[in-house]
Amino acid sequence: MNTIKASVIIPYYKKKKYIKKSIKSVLCQTYQNLEIIIIYDDENKADLKYIKDLKKLDRRIRILVNSKNLGAGESRNFGIINSKGKYICFLDADDTWKKNKLLFQINFMKSSDCSISHTTYEIRNSKEKFIGLRKARNFENYKELLPSCDIGLSTVIVKKKIFTKDIKFSNLKTKEDFVLWLKILKKNIRILGINKNLVIWRETDNSLSSSFVQKIKDAFIVYYKYMNFNIIKSIYFILILSFNFIKKKITEK
C-alpha cells in the first residue's frame, strides 16, 4: 500500500449544509493518494451522527471528536498531530476545491522545492453568486504580509515537517491562521503563490458572523503579542489592516 502523501484537515462546527459538498470536492480530486481528517469541534453533538455517517462516502475519511469546543485553530493542530501525510492541506467545511487542485499544487511544490504554497481563489456567496477573485502572490518576508492577510486558508498546502511545538495555529477566535503564516515567514521560509484559481471560498452568514470588535481584538493580539510591537505600532497596523479589508470588499462588489 502506498504511503499517504496528502492529509486534508477539515474542522467542523455547524456547517452541516455544506460539508458533504466540501468532502466530495476532495474525493473527486485527480490526485488520490490522500486521507481526509474531519475534526468535530462542537460541544452540541446533534450533528455528530451525520458527520460519522460521512465515513461511508470513502474509507479514507477519519473522524476525530474534540471533548469540548476548542476552536478552528486548535482543531487543525489536533488534525495535524494525527495526520499521516507528507503534505498538510487545509479546507474549511463550507469551501470546495476544483478537481485538479491537489495534483497541480503538489507538483508545483515539488518542482519549485517549496515548503508552503497558496493559490488564487474565487469568492461566492451562499447562493453561489460570484463575488470576486483574490489572486495569490509570493511572500518572502513577514513584513510583506503584515498589512493584509492575503492568504486563503483553504488554498494552503504545507509540508508536515514545518510544524513544531512553536510553529502551529494559535487559539485565537479569528486571525489564527494569520499568526501561523507570520511565524513561518519569520523562520525565513518563503510562501509561494500560485496564480491559478483552484478553490471556491464560500462567504456564508457564519463566515461573516465574527464581530468586528472580535476581529480588531485578535488583530491587536497578533501585532502586540506575537509580533512584539508596541501599542502605537500595533494600532497603526490594525488601521492599515482594516483599510485594506474594506478596500478588498469594495473592489469585489
Image (cartoon, grey):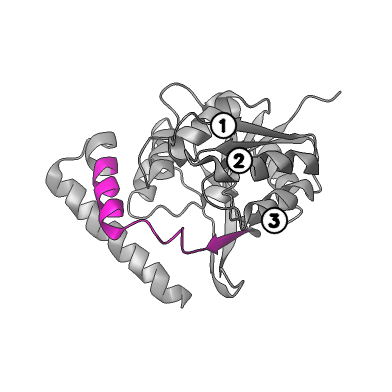
User: At numbered mark 1, what does the secondary structure look like: helix, strand or loop?
Assistant: strand
Picture quadrant where residue 33 is located: top right
Is tag 3's residue or tag 2's residue first in the polypeptide sequence?
3
Q: What residue is at 59 percent from the left and 45 percent from the top?
A: 47
Over which residues does the magenta segment extend?
200-222
Count residues near mark 1 (Cα–Cα under 10 Å), then give few for <14, some for 14-19, many for 20+.
some
Q: Which residue is mark 2?
A: 48
How far separated are the C-alphas under marks 3 and 1?
20 Å
Is tag 3's residue or tag 1's residue first in the polypeptide sequence?
3
Q: Which residue is mark 1?
A: 65
In the image, residue 214 lies in the stretch drawn in magenta: yes
Residue 70 placement (x, y as % from top left): 43, 35
Residue 24 placement (x, y as % from top left): 74, 51
Count residues near mark 3 (Cα–Cα under 10 Å), then give few for <14, some for 14-19, many for 20+.
some
Which is more toward the observer, 57 or 103? 57
User: At numbered mark 3, what does the secondary structure look like: helix, strand or loop?
Assistant: helix
Which is more toward the observer, 87 or 49? 49
In the image, residue 92 lies in the stretch drawn in magenta: no
Please identify, in this view, whether the residue under mark 3 or under mark 1 is nearer the observer: 1
Residue 154 placement (x, y as % from top left): 57, 49
* Vertical comparison of 159 with 224: above or below: above
Is residue 93 in view? yes
Q: Which residue is mark 3?
A: 21
**Is residue 130 left or right of 5 when viewed as pictured?**
left
Please identify, in this view, whether the residue under mark 2 or under mark 1 is nearer the observer: 2
* Vertical comparison of 134 with 182: above or below: below
Which is more toward the observer, 29 or 243? 29
- Circles 2 and 1 in contact, beta carbons < 8 Å: yes
Amino acid marked by disc 3: Lys
User: At numbered mark 2, what does the secondary structure look like: helix, strand or loop?
Assistant: helix
How far separated are the C-alphas under marks 2 and 1?
9 Å
Is tag 2's residue or tag 1's residue first in the polypeptide sequence?
2
